[in-house]
Amino acid sequence: FTYTILNEKDIAMGEKGNCVLAIIKATEEYDNLRDNLIDLRNEMENLEEIQVNGCNYKIDYFLGGDWKFLALVCGVRKANQDYACI
């Protein structure tokens, strides 16, 4: 699980612009991600603004990844199932 500061433009598009927040070893299931990343989720829910060198910055979160990951973290079933909605 990584984060990227989008305002860094070209740096954000490469490997140096992606900073690791968590690495977990678990099967790819919604419950495992939810349980293993609960502390990170709680921190992100409470962090709306930071101050750096006397300047305040509002934080906007954007979720990204491949379709499988996005469906997984959103609790949606696999695209190849008969009924993909929950």
Image (cartoon, grey):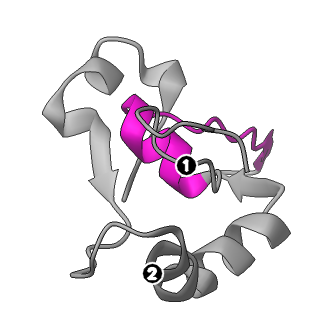
Q: x, y (%) of residue 1? A: 36, 59
**Quick check: 20 left or right of 53?**
left
- Position of 12 relative to 73 (above/below): above
| Mark earlier in primary sequence (1, 2) | 2
Residue 85 in the figure: left or right of residue 64 = right
Asked which secondary structure carries label 1, the reply is: loop
* Residue at image point 19% right, 24% down: 14
* Near-viewer residue (4 or 36): 36
Residue, x 41% and y 45% (percent of image)? 69
CA–CA distance in space, label 1 to label 2: 15 Å
Q: Is mark 2 on a helix, strand or loop?
A: helix
Q: Which residue is drawn at 50% across and 25% down?
A: 6
Quarter assignment of residue 63: top right
Q: Badge 1: few (under 14), some or many (20 or more) residues near its Cα, within 10 Å?
A: some
Which residue, given by chain and number where applicable, does mark 1 sit on?
Answer: 77
Camera sees residue 11: yes
Q: Does the magenta stretch include residue 61?
A: yes
Residue 9 location in percent, x, y? 41, 13
- Magenta region, residue range: 55-73
- Left/right placement of residue 8 relative to residue 48 reads left
Q: Residues within 10 Å of mark 2 (few under 14, many from 20)?
A: some
Residue 31 location (% of width, % of height): 54, 79
Which residue bears the numbered disc 2? 32
In the rendering, at what x and y percent does residue 79 appear?
Answer: 46, 32
Residue 42, located in which quarter of the rendered image?
Answer: bottom right
Residue type at numbered disc 1: Arg
Amino acid at dot 2: Asn
